[in-house]
Image: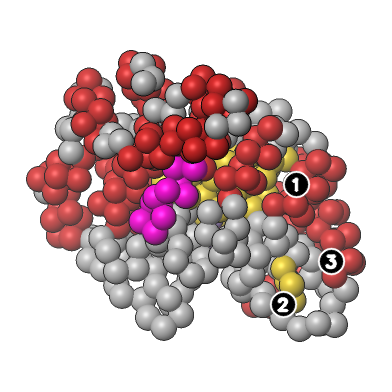
Amino acid sequence: MSDYSAVKAALREQRIETPSWAFGNSGTRFKVFAQEGIPRDAYEKIADAATVHRFTGVAPSVAVHIPWDRVDDYADLAKHAENLGVRIGAVNPNVFQDDDYRLGSVCNPDPAVRKKALGHLLECVDIMDVTGSRDLSIWLADGLNYPGQDSIAERQARLEEALAAVYERLGENQRMLLEYKFFEPAFYATDVPDWGTSYAHCLELGEKAQVLVDTGHHAPGTNIEFIVAFLLRKRRLGGFHFNSRFYADDDLMVGAADPYQLFRIMVEIVLGGGLDAASGVAFMLDQCHNIEPKVPALIRSVLNVQEATAKALLVDAGELRKLQRAGDVLGANAVLTDAFATDVRPLLAELRDEMGLDPDPIAAYRRSGYAERIVAERVGGTAAGWGA
Ligand code: LRH
Ligand code: MN
Ligand code: MN
């Protein structure tokens, strides 16, 4: 059995970033169910993110999505975050919602549209300069619906050109995370469909370009922990967008669909040194809470990541290696399944107590009156930006 104090020390250091858009209303293409108390602007989204941090103690940053979180003064927004005990994390450009992007953004056949998209990506780096953000988190909706619609190869060349221009613009302590997704909104071919494509572009660009793994962006049955182990070993795992899925990019709460998969991912992270701050792996959530209340859903998600991490930390790495070398298939497998079967909730409750937090963050949130207060104070919350 591992040393609990080391497990707790590692958990204390782990940081989980919340996404601003998860606090807004969202839905499917069939219906957005509006909730009460929804943030009306980026300031209120940050206040909700700060609330998640207040009860969990490990979520001190919030990712923003531009233009969903557009404000006049980003320095003021950053100051607001700081006043509430959090900071602005990754900046996510949005080059998928304008009419101009019907045929893509940086891969669009029209140079004028490509120029506009690149301009927005660069503008987001300007915002990072002001907010002190490290990561530009790029996801492109570019792709094709029909064979023959455009040249797959030429689109890769256009992509390369735009990414190189953004990379050039990055400051010394800034990175570019390139997220992939195998389909949707494009249904025939996506321009960054998988980790291999993202990795190849990142390799060409340089060390500040890293792959972002959104757990919902793979075909069913994909071994995500393999991808994680590979990228971590090659020092190209920039971070995660955690969520869970039953079918496609469902964006459900992380750990809800398959906690064993989340555990297996975290095992590779722990064994590969991905919890060390020096590894630079960013643990971010990317979820939509279509029918459940947002703030407690995000608290629950943070707890789910912590539970998976705690179980992964319980894996006895020395014993595992010994059994692996001895070819003890069942023994090695049991090291993992034993750790997964351990109830880590008492350990996490103890840790929270030591951190001056309530051992049960969800119950504490419910008692706090925050939910009632935002319902009373906020009228006319906005949609997160899509799905309406
Ligand atoms: C795309 C995606 C990407 C976007 C977010 C809203 O499916 O995962 O990260 O920025 O959803
Ligand atoms: Mn994502
Ligand atoms: Mn997604």
Please indicate, yes or no, whether residue 94 appears anywhere in the rendered image.
no
Q: Quadrant of residue 384?
A: bottom left
Which residue is found at the position 51% from the left and 42% from the top? 265
Which residue is under mark 2?
188
Magenta span covers which residues?
254-264
Vertical arrangement, residue 13 with respect to residue 42, above or below: above
Question: According to the image, what is the colour scheme of the structure?
Answer: secondary structure
Dot 2 amino acid type = Tyr
* Residue 286 counted in the magenta span: no
Please indicate, yes or no, whether residue 182 appears anywhere in the rendered image.
yes
3D distance between C-alphas at marks 1 and 2: 21 Å
- Choose the circle earlier in sequence order: 1 or 2: 2
Mark 2 or mark 3, which is nearer to you?
2
- Choose the circle earlier in sequence order: 3 or 1: 3
- Choose the circle earlier in sequence order: 2 or 3: 3
Mark identifier at residue 155: 3
Q: Quadrant of residue 85?
A: top left
Q: Secondary structure at mark 3?
A: helix
* Residue 262 counted in the magenta span: yes
Vertical arrangement, residue 201 with respect to residue 5, above or below: below
3D distance between C-alphas at marks 2 and 3: 14 Å
3D distance between C-alphas at marks 3 and 1: 17 Å
Q: Secondary structure at mark 2?
A: loop
282 relative position to 148: left or right = left
Mark identifier at residue 199: 1
